[in-house]
Amino acid sequence: MVKGFTAPDPMQLDLMRTWSATPRQVLSKLRWPSAVPYLFAGLKVAVTISLIGAIVAELPTGAEAGLGARLLAGSYYGQTIQIWSALLASAILASGLIGLVGLAERGVARQMGHGLEPARLRLGFILATAGMLLALVLPLSTGAAATLPARPILFALTLAAAVLFAVAAWTGGWRAIAPASPVRSGCRDHAGLAARSRHRRLGGRGFWVMMLAVWLGAALCVIELATMGPRRGAARRTLNLAIPLLFGAAVFYLWKCWCAALGFPRDHAAAECCRGAVLRILADAVPRLRPDFRARRADRLRHRLQRGLLVAIVAQRFAFLGRGLLPLGNSSRRCRWSGSRRSW
Amino acid sequence: MSAERPLLPAPHQVIAAFVDSVFGYPPNAPRSLVYHSGVTLSATLLGFLLGAMLGIALALMIVHSRVLEKSLLPWIICSQMVPILALAPIFIVVLGAIGLQGLLPKSIISAYLCSSRSPSGW
């Protein structure tokens, strides 16, 4: 906001002085209008922060109502599903609030006669959330679908996915959008497969192969979309929507497969078993992390810096990560204003 | 939905529970997520209004007074570094001691966050 008020450059301020404007006139005619974009960018941050504040404030009071209380109660009684649904509700609430501020911004901008800057990334983020929800709705283990008559359909779906991948590989370019549908059909394939192999500890070999294949297809699709052509206009806008959407769907797909393969929601024995798996993973990771903890502070800092640098380099090298992942992590902060305008 | 307390719930379980707790109960029932969201939303909006007004006023003062810019702005920026999770209980306890309870302390915490972010950020 301070940055916004100091945005007018000295020439403009001098011009106001030549017109012998009073400080109040400078404020209302020059400083305030030039601060409005900053104001709304700040308000978007502020409204999400204030939601976080309200939720955090409900945590230590032991409040009876509110999303924070719901989270706390869920963690007391080990109701993970309740925690997750409260998280979902808060995410939806935050998206709605940002959307409201965005609407106000659009109205004010129109009234002030500014052209609209397309808020592409923000919209893309909202749509990514919607895509996630869509990916969530797809059934995980349908007991009936695991029977034999359902097999041919699964087979046909797999075949269709393969054909579509082939077509995308053949044509390239914008036709790479085609793999988007195999991702979805692949999800269904997996639902069937997971249901079939639910009595085993892990999914069969075919399960993993197909998961890898579909994941690879989605990644290729995102890479293709992220690096391709149109600079502006509707095509660019659709692309900027499609990439985070696809990325989110792919991530959720992986989550789903993980849940299905490890048999998380099955029964007590399976739960024990997957807890064992998690412990094994931890036991595997701890020895690797221990030297890091033993190292001196400077070393630790250096490691961390290197890791951050690595992430930055990787995100910069691969448009897949830079365009798919960064919008998800950053969208609430820098939805419209590029880094150069950031004051602190 | 076969296991009641999964370690990591599958997405369809989350969605089912979400839909159930949003649409399955009347909006004023304590089991309804709509009710909880409403409570949080009211605190959020009140805090947002208070905080945004305070933040804009602070920004105006900082722009117009060089003294305030030099003295106040660093503190505002420093205050963003303090984790809110550490401050929230202090706020709640202190405000509770002077008889403020319910909606207002929550809104004050979110207003504090808002007002410290909005003048310095952006």
Image (cartoon, coloured by chain):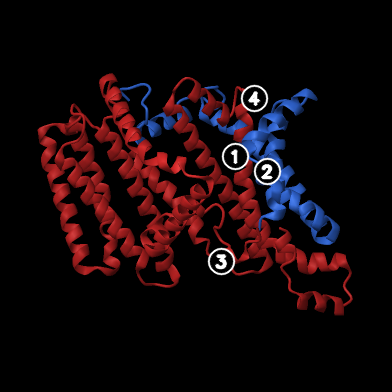
Chain colours: A red, B blue
Residue A323 showing in the rendered view: no
Q: Which residue is mark 4?
A: A61
A303 relative to A283 in the view: left or right:
right
* Residue B76 spot, x, y in % from top left: 73, 49
Q: Chain of mark 4?
A: A
Mark sitting earlier along the chain (3/1)? 1
| Tags 2 and 4 on a common chain | no
What distance separates the C-alpha of mark 2 from that of mark 4? 18 Å
The answer to which quarter of the image holds residue B88 is top right
Residue carrying label 3:
A117
Q: Tell me which amino acid carries mark 3.
A: Glu
Q: How many angstroms separate mark 3 from mark 1 (CA)?
A: 28 Å
Q: In the image, are marks 4 and 3 on the same chain? A: yes
Is mark 1 in CB contact (under 8 Å) with mark 4? no
Comparing marks 3 and 2, which lies closer to the viewer?
Answer: 2
**Which element is circle 4 on?**
helix
Could you tell me the amino acid type at mark 1?
Ile
Cα separation between marks 1 and 4:
15 Å
Q: Provide residue A300's location: percent of width, then percent of height.
A: 49, 47
Label 3 and label 2: CA atoms lie apart by 28 Å
Corner quadrant of residue A57: top right
Viewer-side residue, B55 vs A145 = B55
Of mark 4 and mark 3, the one earlier in the sequence is 4
Q: Nearer the viewer, mark 4 or mark 3?
A: 4
Q: Secondary structure at mark 2?
A: helix
Could you say which is closer to the camera, residue A94 or residue A11? A11
Mark drawn on residue B113: 2
| Residue type at numbered disc 2 | Leu
Element on which disc 3 rests: loop
